[in-house]
Amino acid sequence: MVAEVPGAIGRVADVGARVQAWPARSAAYFGLAVIILATMLNFLDAQVFGMLAQRIKIDLGLTDEQLGFLIGPANIIFYVLVGIPLGLIAAVRRSSWVDYVAMGTSLSTLSMPIFWVAIVAIWLFSLQLGWLPVSGRAGPVWHWEGLRHILLPAATLATTSVAIISRLTRSGMLDVLGREYVTTARAKGVPPSRVVGKHALANALIPVVTVVGLQYGFLLGGAVVTETIFAWPGVGRLAITAILQRDYPVVQGCVLLVAVVFVLVNLLVDLLYGWLDPRIRYE
Amino acid sequence: MNEIWRRFAKHRLAVIGLAVILGLVVLAFGARRIAPHDPIRQDLPHALATPSAEFPLGTDEFGRCILSRILFGARLSLLVGVIATGIGATTGILLGLCAGYFPRADAPVMRCMDVLLAFPSILLAIAVVAALGPSLVNVMIAVGVRSVPSFARVSRSMVLSLKELEFVQGASALGASHARVLFRHILPNSVSPLLVFSSMQVATAILLAAILSFLGLGVQPPTPEWGKMVSDGRAYLMEAPHVSLFPGLAIFVAVMGFNCLGDGLRDALDPRVGRVAVE
């Protein structure tokens, strides 16, 4: 679709022809032709894929493990670790102040523009308190510096998802806690923590897990903005620069990459169902 | 109607949401009278002033009054939110009605919608604006296009369930034309879920439009726009955080208003409709 952008390819090709010192452009031009051909033939062979990967690396000078998806897993961990307990507590302490605060916060978070959340976070944690760096990336996440750099972008990106997940967990838990088997478990003297943690949570989690998977798809959208603000060299920022520069192969590569990861994550979610609810089996 | 109003009024958040939106509309229309300063005229000696009696919310890097700019920006954001949703709703509902009613149109239309849905919504909007060039109308189109598939899905599912009901079957048996069945019988009966969905969509549209102009793809300067104001203030976060803080707060209030309104409308109009996931 981006290939339909008017005035793009012709003009860019013109510029490319005039500015001889821009060799990457001809590669992009060639790549576009290959991709249109491949799409027409309805397959994308290994060579095209290899070239895309190469282009992505050339463009920002990234290496494979830097490809920005680090922010994705970091983000999932964040919203699972925050969202689910939040919803859980809100459900167990229903109509208490904890519930009101948690649900009020999540409703307001859903209404906040993500770029503003990012800016407020930078202002508070980086400029005022000086705890975390303002932007950029520094080494792998398993190092202290790298972890400090990823914390703010990942947390910002996760805010919307945390809100959705905690609301879902809460409504799921409220539904399950009213069921008869929970009453039975309570009646036979199972400690409350076990009733909530084991009997109820496992059953309330199934819709939550589905959404955790789906959220991953919306992630790229938020990532575009978050990565721009935090100058994080990820796929989101790569995608928007590519669109603005009419760099079609890179756009296609980004969309493809995101689609593949999205499918894989959702496959994982499907497998998780079986673990959460042994009644679900795959033939 | 009374019954609906009663149920709506019981929903405290919804009433607050409605009040907030009405308030914003009044402020937006009265911006010319209320605003203490010209939103565009530069006043460099007062650049980056902190909130004071003369400038209640301070000034930006060109000395323009932030309160005035927020008031004028309200017009734009509300307009974009409502019109973009209108564009998305009309197109999406028409497509959804056709897909649901004519079995032969179903697969082609819905597969096209799936393709649109497969793009992350922000990337789709960015691509549309990049294609058409940044301007107010194009932002509306871009944001509208994004909601077409969701509207198509909602209206299609309404048609699918309604067209099996006796009154619709009866109407076609009496010889009513397809158009009559669709627009006189099916559409009026799917108004409430579509209304609920639309009010939530306005919220998302305002957010998305703000994101676009934050990225520099929206309304061009010097027109005051909330997203752009936040973006401009970024450079002065250290010495003048209020430049970014207040416009963002305005976006938050507007979006929150529409979200609450949607919540309340859902409870009032149709308790059966499930929660629509907010992206």
Image (tube, coloured by chain):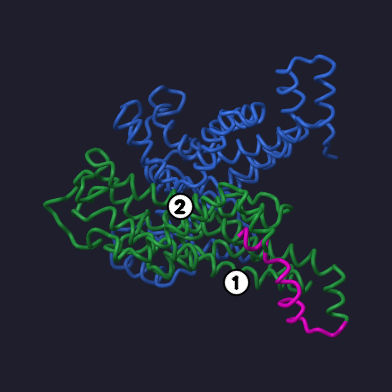
Chain colours: A blue, B green
Q: Which residue is mark 2?
A: A239
Q: Quadrant of residue A196?
A: top right
- In depth, the one of A256 and A244 nearer the eye is A244
In this rendering, position of residue B237 left or right of residue B45:
right
Residues drawn in magenta: B174-197
Q: Is residue B21 left or right of residue B273?
A: left
- Is B177 covered by the magenta stretch? yes
Kindly identify the residue that appears in the image at 39 percent across and 51 percent down: B250
**Outermost residue toward the left in this view:** B45
Residues tagged 1 and 2 counted as in contact (Cβ below 8 A) = no
Amino acid on which the number 1 mark rests in the picture: Thr
Q: Which residue is mark 1?
A: B91
**In the displayed structure, would residue A48 be above or below residue B160?**
above
Which secondary structure type mostly characterizes the magenta part of the structure? helix
Q: CA distance from mark 1 to mark 2?
A: 28 Å
Residue B219 at x, y = what percent? Answer: 35, 64
Q: Residue visible at 22% across and 59% down?
A: B37
Is residue A154 a member of the stretch shown in magenta? no
x and y, in percent, of residue A38 in the image: 59, 62
Judged from the image, the secondary structure of the residue bearing numbered disc 2 is: helix
Along the viewing direction, whichever of A34 and A249 lies nearer the viewer: A249
